[in-house]
Structures are given as C-alpha cells and as structure tokens.
Image (spheres, rainbow, N blue to C red):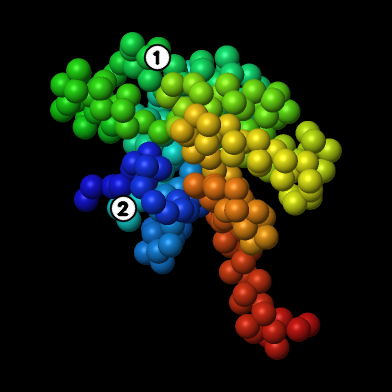
Amino acid sequence: MTTPLLKDRLQQPGLIRVMSAGRVMHHNLLQIVGIHGGFHGFWFDLEHTGGDVKDIEIASLAARSQGMDSFCRVAPTDYGIVTRCLEAGSGGVMAAQIFTAKQADEFVRWAKFAPRGLRGLNVGGFDADFARQPIPVYMERANRETFVAIQIETLSALEECEAIAAIDGVDLLFVGPSDLGQHLGYPGDFLHEKALAALDRVSAACRNTGKHWGAVCITPAHARAMLDRGVKLLSPASDVKLINAGLNAVQKDYAELFGN
C-alpha cells in the first residue's frame, strides 16, 4: 500500500486532519482510529513523552497499515533524534519550543541531506527501504519528501514567524495555542484578542511566503476561528482526549449505572 504523504496533501485542496498520540501510542489504538476513518495522519508527541525508536517504528507501521502518514514532534536539542525518527519510518519531524529563525534553520538542516542540510547518511532504515535504494536516489527523495514543521509557541518565534516561514525546507508553521497563550498572558483563553491576533500574523506570514500553517484546536469555536483564517492542518484529537471522550460518552449513555 502506498501511503499518501502529508507533505503532498499540503498542495491539494481540503483540510488535513491529524491526531496526536504519545501517552497511549499503542498500535491497536492507532489502527482503530484508522479503521474508524476521518483522519489523514498522526503526529507522535516525543516532547512530552519518552517514546524510543522501537515505539516510533511500530507506531508509524500501524499508521501506514491504514494508509496514514505520520510525523514526530521533538525538542530541537538533539540532532540524532531527528534522523532516528525519519529512519524509523515517520514521514517528518516537527520542532517544539523554537525561539528564532536561526534555530529553525538549524532544525531543517538536521532533517535534510547535503547540499541543503547536515543529516547523517545511513541507508539501513525504513526510509531507504533497508539499504535497497541507491544512495543518490535515497538522498534526493528524502530531501524532497521529508515533512518539516516548526512550532510557533513562544513570543520570539511569533515575532520571527515571517522569517521562519520563509526558510527553505520549512513546510508548515504549527501554532501551539497552550504555550503561546501562557507566554502572551492568556493561558486557557484560546479566543482572546491576542490569540486571534497571533493567528492573523502566522496566517499572513504563511500566505506571503507560499507556505501553510496548522494548529491544535481546543474547541469547535477555536477550530472555526482558525478555519476562517485559512488553516490547512488541524489536530482536534489526541489519544488522551479520545479516551476521556469515550469514557464520558459511556457514563452519559449509561447514566443510571453510574449514578451512585
């Protein structure tokens, strides 16, 4: 089965819907989501959880079994984790806690082979068909297909979002509303005027550079505010949110059983 790439979907009409997983990044859960339908891919949260290479291999394999691409969110502190995510089968990487365009450019270079980047060359992983691809073919394809996103969730990243969006190799700016909210002084108020102004700025930066942007959406109203501003990729669900919603639904449907 050929898995449609999220990077290719960016150039096609329509909204891209992704789900995050980290606390419960189990292959069965990922396959249930895929079988249920509605999502185009996953992003695996390695910033807040401790997933290792084997976890990424299994999770990305489960995603691909349902025709879904994936990318990994990582802290921009470890060159090695970037290439390990890609060699394990994830379709891309996303940098959390970026502060400057210079830092974002360094992250892109970690994810790209020469001449654009500094990525170490090893053909033994899934992304090189386990050494079956010729090196020049592998390098060209990886540079072309690898998805790279940069989170805009700090004040300095917001101030430099125009420069970050303009970086060669950045495919998507991804707004982190919770962290951005705490830094702007409105934690939890995702429709605050400053929050909406930040969305306007990120949207304009992407529009002016021919790039796209995405975000976590917290409520339907929050999602609508971003749709009105041209968001391309939205993440309305996570593994924990999914489980809580399911438990709430069961207790509501069986209220008589849970009344005491």
**The image quarter in which residue 10 lies:** top left
Q: What element carries label 2?
A: loop
Q: Can residue 234 be seen in this view?
A: yes
Residue at 62% x, 66% y: name it. 245
Kindly identify which residue carries mark 1.
117
**In front of the other: label 1 or label 2?**
1
Residue at 64% x, 23% y: name it. 160
x, y percent for residue 31: 39, 58
Q: What element carries label 1?
A: loop
Q: Which amino acid does label 2 sit on?
A: Gly
Residue 75 vs 225, above or below: the answer is above
Disc sitting over residue 208 in the figure? none
Residue at 36% x, 47% y: name it. 12
Left or right, residue 32 beside residue 259 = left
Q: Is residue 125 visible?
A: no
Kindly identify which residue carries mark 2.
67
Q: In which quarter of the image is the C terminus?
A: bottom right
x, y percent for residue 180: 72, 37
- Say which label, 1 or 2, has the lower sequence index: 2
Left or right, residue 135 beside residue 120 = left
Residue at 40% x, 33% y: name it. 147
Left or right, residue 74 beside residue 138 = right
